[in-house]
Amino acid sequence: MDYSRIFKMPFANVYPMYIQKAEKKNRTKDEVNEIIFWLTGYDKDTLQQHIDTGSDFETFFMQAPQINPNASKITGSICGYRVEEIENELMQKIRYLDKLVDELAKGKTLEKILRK
């Protein structure tokens, strides 16, 4: 499958949708950021740099300081695909983030979302 269109999509275009999805369910931007920090190893400043520079998803994940070793514990379906079965590593990371934001919007506690 050709994922190049998704990989080249600016993270800054999708980030507000993550926030909006969470806020519709009475969750916060800070919680979305905490999920991103946990998954990628970014902090507030480095996340903002990627948003400001318009980094695409490929760059965003390639430059991530450290993908959380517990990311492999993220399971379930998102967009009709089981995240643990996605073979393309970059696509899997993108879907991990989608799944975590989805769990937040569905009311899971941060402790459970962050696999603590």
Image (tube, helix red, strand yellow):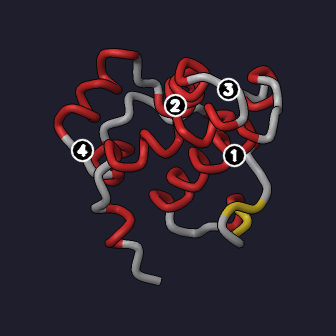
Label 1: few (<14), some or many (≥20) within 10 Å?
Answer: some
What is the spatial separation of the Cα atoms under label 1 and label 3, in whole angstroms?
Answer: 11 Å
Q: Quadrant of residue 31?
A: top right
Above or below: residue 21 compared with residue 108: below
Label 3: few (<14), some or many (≥20) within 10 Å?
Answer: some
Residue beneath disc 3: 27
**Earlier residue among tags 2 and 4:** 2
Residue beneath disc 2: 36
Above or below: residue 75 compared with residue 2: above
Look at discs 1 and 3 and give the one toward the viewer.
Answer: 3
**26 on left or right of 111:** left
Q: Are marks 1 and 2 in contact (CB under 8 Å)?
A: no
What is the spatial separation of the Cα atoms under label 2 and label 4, in whole angstroms?
Answer: 15 Å
**55 on left or right of 42:** left
**Earlier residue among tags 2 and 3:** 3
Label 4: few (<14), some or many (≥20) within 10 Å?
Answer: some
Tell me the amino acid under the disc marked 4.
Ser
Q: Are marks 3 and 4 in contact (CB under 8 Å)?
A: no
Tell me the amino acid under the disc marked 2.
Ile
Tell me the amino acid under the disc marked 3.
Arg
- In percent of width and height, residue 28 lies at 60, 22
In the picture, the disc for residue 55 is: 4
Which residue lies most toward the left here?
53
What is the spatial separation of the Cα atoms under label 2 and label 3, in whole angstroms?
Answer: 14 Å
Identify the residue shown where x is 79% and y is 56%: 76
Q: Quadrant of residue 39?
A: top right
* Element marked by disc 3: loop
**Earlier residue among tags 4 and 1:** 4
* Element marked by disc 2: helix
Residue beneath disc 1: 102
